[in-house]
Amino acid sequence: MRIKQAERNIRYSLIIYALNNILKFIVRVVFVKCLPVEYLGINGLFSNVLALLTLAELGVGQSIVYSLYKPLAIDDTETVKLLMKLFKKAYIAIGCFIIAAGFLMIPWLEWFIKDNNISNLRLFYVIFLLNTGISYFYAYKRDIIIADQKQYINSIYQGIGQIILAVFQVVSLVVYESYLIYIALMLVITMCENWMVARKADKLYPYLRESAAGCLSSDIYLKIKQNIKAMLGHRLGSVLVTSSPNIILSKFIGLSAIAVYSNYFLVISAVNNLASQIFASLTAGIGNLIALESSQKKADIFKVIEFIVAWQALIVSCGFYVLFNPLIELWLGKSFLFETIIVDCLIVNFYLMYMRKAVLAFRDASGLYWNDRYKPLAEAIINLVASVSLTIHYGVIGVIWGGIISTLLTCFWVEPYVLFRNSIDIKLKDYFQDYFKYAAVTLLTAVFSKWLCSKLFSEVTIVNFVLGVVLCLVITNVVWIVIFRKREEMAYLRNVARDKFGMKFL
């Protein structure tokens, strides 16, 4: 049942996500042709500034999903109703707080921008603020759908909303060349999409409309409080690490640097968000696995998912190493290119972040937020100090170095240590042995692929780019399958593909 649900979640997520991101790239092309490049910087800056306000969420969302796994698995509707009542109050309070706090930040907006010459800056900010705050008012109903292994429903609504938004934004840019209309559409679609998801949740779980009798058990309530306290640190660390690059670049270099950085970040985010869609589809199933299965079963499934993550990281990192700058040049032009050394550092940072996904999925499903509560604070402090210092001295590359340094000193070893000590019965030594094998194969494959592509395709053209993509896909998959063909994880994947998806030739 878990495999069937995960397969459906992933299938719908991939289809919607592919359409959504194709339109996002089209919107970006139209955007840079119709509006000054500084507006692209404003987009990135406001998104990151407002991300700081989402600290008020305190990790309630992840605590909701974790606390709902067991009652949904055993059809304990009374506990589900009590939990949803609690989280409804919490989310409405969070949304109101974010909007109120956001208005208090308006007088200091110009401080974040070096050499600001954007008119109507505060109006643009208010629209971004409302878009962020209002999204919380119905978020608790989205979470129950995700926790019940129905991520595909959430993906469909989000995808359709984003596709409609992209179409209207392109039309508005071409016809009116107005940034105000461009972001106002974002607010309208957010409100409509959240309302539609809430209606769908009411249909799927009609008992949510009934009054919840009694109170939550003290064990559940204390666990939620503990997770929220722990998640405050996780939220703080995550927001500071992900939001600080654009803010630091805006403060010390200017909006034009954000405009270039944001294009690379958009591509990386497209890949990361795709992976997030997949792992969001799997996490509820993992939570169900952890609640019901044996220690050996949990360890075996973790190794399979880590193997898949490393395989994906090889394919994407190799593709980035060979084709990242050609993609940007074909998409937006040479004026939006970074130097090769900056791009290489972006790829290293991407690989380190991507390889955390299996550990994080099992950590979230296990509810181990309390056990590594100090890690995100250490990560955030190291990242902020290193990024600011290195950016002042070395420019854009300093922000990327800051992320790499903070990841290696904290997340790289703390997260697997906490998971294997508290939930999954795997030795840390064995995990890192596999990790470095995967990393070595990735590095050597990427270097060989770039050497071969440079010999075969010397010019940057659409045809050469497509051929480069095909070549990278062939090389990475052949290398991985040949080197790891005898591993148990590969045998497991062959069996799943053959038995569950009808690939009898395997």
Image (spheres, rainbow, N blue to C red):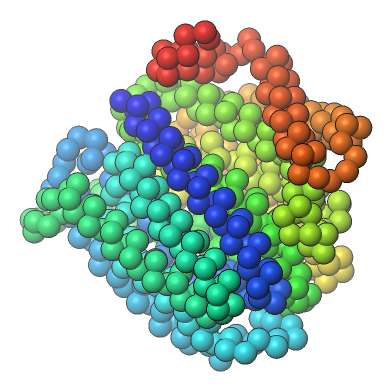
Residue drawn 83% across and 71% down?
A: 392
Q: Residue at x 9, y 56 (%)?
A: 210
Picture quarter with the N terminus: top left
Compare residues 153 and 173 and report the one nearer the observer: 173
User: Visible in this render: residue 55?
Assistant: no
234, above or below 298, in the image: below
| 395 sits to left or right of 289 | right
Q: Position of residue 37 (x, y in %)?
A: 71, 73
Left or right, residue 64 beside residue 100 = left
49 to the left or right of 474: left
Q: Pick the residue in front: 121 or 59.
A: 121
Q: Position of residue 127 (x, y in %)?
A: 47, 79
Classify residue 479 by image quadrant: top right
Q: Is residue 72 above or below residue 163?
A: above
Whether 432 is drawn above or below 458: the answer is above
Q: Is residue 337 visible?
A: yes
Please state which of residues 222 and 319 is positioned toward the viewer in this rendering.
319
Q: Residue furthest front?
A: 175
Identified at 62% across, 42% down, the residue is 354
Left or right: 1, with 263 as reference point: left
Q: x, y percentage for residue 180? A: 52, 80
Work out whether 91 lies above or below 363.
below
